[in-house]
Amino acid sequence: MRVEKKIEEAAQLIVQSHRMVAFTGAGHSTSSGIPDFRSPHSGLWEKNNPMLVASIWSFRLNPNNFYDWIRPMVDTLIHAEPNPAHRALAELERLGYLQVVITQNIDDLHQRAGSRRVLELHGHLREATCVRCYKKVPVDPAMVNLLLSGQVPRCNECGGVLKPDVILFGEQLPIRVLNQAMEEARRCDLMLVAGSSLEVTPAADIPFLAVDCGAKAIIVNLEPTSFDSRADVVIHGDVAEILPCLVEAVSEMGGARERDM
Ligand code: NAD
């Protein structure tokens, strides 16, 4: 089927829905210059073993491994701007169709694009926590400069290592956020998955939970995923190109509508 036809079908599902939820992953931000984990050739795991650089066990043993890995990406993360895919989801919320974005991303780009309801399953980079005394501090420019100079940020109270509030492999997801996301998945009648390989659980279970509870589903991803066979519309394409077209089609079909919270 041609992609235009698929976009039309997806737009129809959105206009007919009463409670739509979006679930996004690293692929949503690749057009903003932030590499994902698993894309062939460009994914971050092409060069690194995740368990050695981004697990809680390796962080506790040797935080340098984590900081040496993330240091070259800090500049990219700081300077990344929302792309048309982020803006499209913000627009769907503004138009009254999208209730919430559930994201695995830590880059803050949904919020910066204007999305107001965002559930961050894997945390964020706005704050850091001391692994020894659990003091929480904002990630400010001074900490970023310290990190860029090759040092490991430390707690000014106890000298323990500071860990950004992102969820590393082996860590529990923030339970309140996870519960809210699962509740949204159970309640929604349309799930839009965008830019995720759906290989990282338990986050990846959320779209499956939605369809198990009766929701219809749309997936937009460059590569096939295990969710494709459960979705009503599958589009293999770039979210930064497809999602703006989807919003345009929704606007033409349905325009703005009252929020249905
Ligand atoms: P992933 O790397 O496992 O999968 C990304 C998927 O997106 C791939 O299937 C790829 O084909 C697809 N993709 C890449 N660019 C795309 C585009 N422009 N349009 C459509 N599809 C595109 O990422 P994941 O599923 O999110 O899971 C891995 C983990 O990655 C998550 O835990 C997340 O926290 C973390 N992560 C986040 C960021 C970020 O915050 N931007 C960056 C890297 C990794």
Image: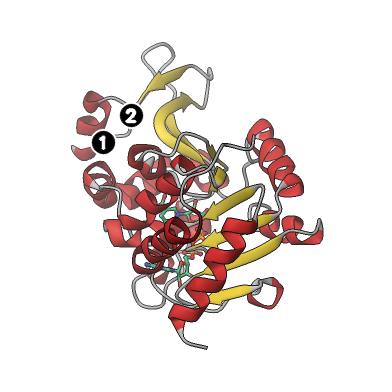
- On the question of residue 77 being in view, the answer is yes
Q: Position of residue 36 (x, y in %)?
A: 40, 62
Distance Cα–Cα, label 2 vs label 1: 6 Å
Who's the residue at 67% across and 48% down the image? 18
User: What element does badge 1 sit on?
Assistant: helix
So how many labels did they put on this image?
Answer: 2
Q: Which residue is mark 2?
A: 153
- On the question of residue 198 being in view, the answer is no
Who's the residue at 75% across and 61% down the image? 211
Quarter of the C terminus within the rendering: top right
Q: Position of residue 73 (x, y in %)?
A: 28, 51
Amino acid type for the residue under numbered disc 2: Pro
Quadrant location of residue 85? bottom left
Q: Determine the residue located farthest toward the right in the rendered image.
A: 213
Identify the mark nearer the N-term, 2 or 1: 1
Label pair 2/1, CB-CB below 8 angstroms: yes
* 164, 91: nearer the viewer: 91
Who's the residue at 28% across and 56% down the image? 32
* 229, 174: nearer the viewer: 229
Quadrant location of residue 153? top left
Q: Position of residue 44 (x, y in %)?
A: 39, 64
Q: Which residue is mark 1?
A: 147
